[in-house]
Amino acid sequence: MTKRERILLDGIWKGAYSAECGQPTCLADAVSAGMHEIPANVPGSLETDLEAAGILPEIFFGENVLKTYDYENVHYCYSRPFDYEPGDTDDVLVFEGIDCFADIYVDGVKIGECDNMLYGREYPLTGLSAGEHELFVHITPAAIEARKHPLAPSMSCNEFNFDSLYVRKAPHMYGWDIMPRLVSCGIWKHVWLERRPKYHIDDLFLFTQSCDENRARIKATVSTTIGNVNVHDRCYMKFTGVCGDSTFEITKPMRHNTFVFTFDVHQPKLWFPHNYGDPNVYTVTAELYVQDELCETREFTFGIRTVQLDRTSTTDKDGSGEFCFRINGRKVFAMGSNWVQVDAIHARDEQRLPEILPMLTDIGCNIVRCWGGNVYENDIFYKYCDEHGIMIWQDFSMACAMYPQDEYFQSIMRREVEAVVKRLRNHPAIILWAGDNECDCAYSWGGDRLDPNENVITRKVIPEVLRIHDFSRPYLPSSPFIDEYAHRNGGSISEDHLWGPRDYFKGSYYKNTVCHFASETGYHSCPSPESLAKYIDKDHLWPCLGDRQWLVHAATMTGEESHSYGYRIRLMWNQVETLFGKGNKTTADLDTFAKASQISQAEAKKYFIERFRLSKWRRTGIIWWNLIDGWPQISDAIVDYYYDKKIAYDYIKRSQRPFCMMFDEPENGKLNLYGVNDTRTDKLIRYTVEDDTGKVIVSGEALVKSDESTQVCAIPATDEKRYYIIRWTDGETEGINHYFANIIDIDYDYYLTLLEKLK
């Protein structure tokens, strides 16, 4: 046996739940304690099992998600039999994800426990006899466990999130502006019995020290289990890597069970993000030999690339600063989406990913930011990004709060970060570790202007783990990062989240921002009436203002407009009235309102993206919010939960083309037309600009150099409300874009004629 064998234990288990149950160690204990039996799906959750059993109504419909609050203090137990046959192998039970506090038993004997939803655990099986055995998991409610930890006055968060601060679950599960409060529990990922060769490879890490087109210098770290074997007795590792016609092979004698070495790859195929080269990935085979006998073969993928982040603390309106990624020494303009949860119930993440991931490629993304309110994504996600040249900015799972600083919390974060880093560090797509989302900002939200640089978790614990286990990537303690200089001196930071008043999208806040890199910005819109009807009762579909079901699906955790995130429906309404004027037809019925709000969102996100792109390299990247909803909601997403694309999807797809033409805002009585070329070749293009009557305003030919934004021409600015259609060709491909002059208080029917032309 030279490869690991996985015996999957997914499927229908026996479940039992109740608010009180004592300390059961097997299903018989749970039943005798009065727990209620139901079928339990693995992967799954308590809520979906209750829904399937008819105990909870359809969770995502109407106000039903509020009913899950009644089950936050419930214990949940899982049981199933499994067959076992001892052998000359090293056997473990692997739980890829348990949510969250659990004890694990085999035949009533405790073999381990869990206190963290966010990474997997393995439990050795030793001394187990042949035959059938009971695997039993007792999950205690996170809401009750959280009460064991009094909160210090220095800790702060949203009013619904206090019980999240000591508990390592996805922060959004306690309620967010884009997610319902759905605290949940369960075995949410796969479970299997893994049989490993007696002598096996425990851990492998390859990273690029330096590279160019001629040579790459690779460093490898290997950890093995080889028992009491003498390492000098013909023990060695063999590595073979293949990427197209590029190969490498190296055999390394072992001097210890864990060892580090370097080797060269000549004429390597380098990994580049989309628009900047090919995302070359090597298939690497690692073989462990003990006394000349092949003991284990492991296969994984590896990308040869270096990454650095050029960053200054602050900047100004003159651009005296920087925030720019370099891949293999080359500056990269980044554009893409914040990656938030794809389902509020994470047991369903994996089945949704295959339909969602290709959208990133379709609309031209070369970066995603794994937001800190989420879980760490499924392996499918990271593999897709590796293979499609999509850079990953990876937050650790903390967001919008001042977290505990005590030794207990430091220890659980240290274990989590180490597990996550070891799991993910071989992925070339990951170009940045970030400590959290907006926790630096949270230090000033209470008005005290405390110093975020005293945060021991992001300034000490995480960097210490990274220094030990992965120093091959940049680290940003928070996003946005307020370092000591920025805290002392103020000023505009080089990387920022651009939310602001969320009023007119071309207003002074958005127009005058000076950051180099926007890692969040977004704009609201309404899903289609067809999607809304799937989760809002027909009697509540219209009007929307003040309606409880609309408010619940805007993540208002009480269904009241005055609480939590109740402002978001009215915000969307106001944005529509800003664009089309008050008292017009766009707010008269649902169909018109939904389309008008999608137009508002589409134009806003188009403007945000193009403003950053045409000012390349003064600005270096934009990560907008966000691709798809994780539950049926009214939000900033451009694709709703049911995969229905909003108008913004097509607008962003046009604005993110590797070569795109776009107008800047009026300046000195002129509209300047730019060609933005993110490709690796110069573009000689022919272009025309026509107005809404079809009259050609300007046409010509221009050379736009590779990786630059170039002003092509200018036309007179107008005080009228008018749209222009831009068309171009480079002889091989054609493109189209538009610009709407004075786009505020416009006529809805007039705008619809533009949509017809853009088809």
Image: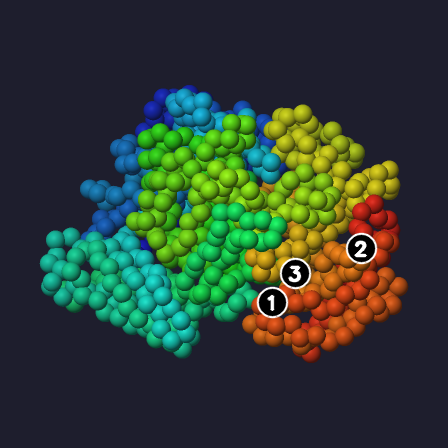
Q: Residue at x 79, y 50 (%)?
A: 743
Q: Residue at x 35, y 35 (%)?
A: 410
Q: In the depicted view, which residue is nearer to us: 522 or 671?
A: 671
| Coloring applied to the structure | rainbow
Secondary structure, mark 2, is strand
Secondary structure, mark 3, is helix
Q: In the depicted view, which residue is nearer to us: 238 or 491?
A: 491
Q: Residue at x 12, y 57 (%)?
A: 229
Mark before the other along the chain sequence, 2 or 3: 3
| Image position of 629 with respect to 671: above or below | above
Q: Amino acid at mark 2?
A: Ala
Identify residue for label 3.
Answer: 614
Q: Is residue 425 left or right of residue 158?
A: left
Give the quarter of the figure containing the C terminus.
bottom right
Mark before the other along the chain sequence, 1 or 3: 3
Numbered circle sitting on residue 708: 1
Give the quarter of the figure containing the N terminus.
bottom left
Identify residue for label 2.
Answer: 741
Residue 4 percent location from the top left of the image: 30, 56
Q: Are marks 1 and 3 in contact (CB under 8 Å)?
A: no
Mark before the other along the chain sequence, 1 or 2: 1
Q: CA distance from mark 1 to mark 2?
A: 25 Å
Q: Is residue 148 visible?
A: yes
Q: Amino acid at mark 1?
A: Glu
| Image position of 569 with respect to 215: above or below | above
Q: In the depicted view, which residue is nearer to us: 81 or 347?
A: 347
Choose top left, top right, bottom left or bottom right for residue 554: top right
Choose top left, top right, bottom left or bottom right for residue 159: top right
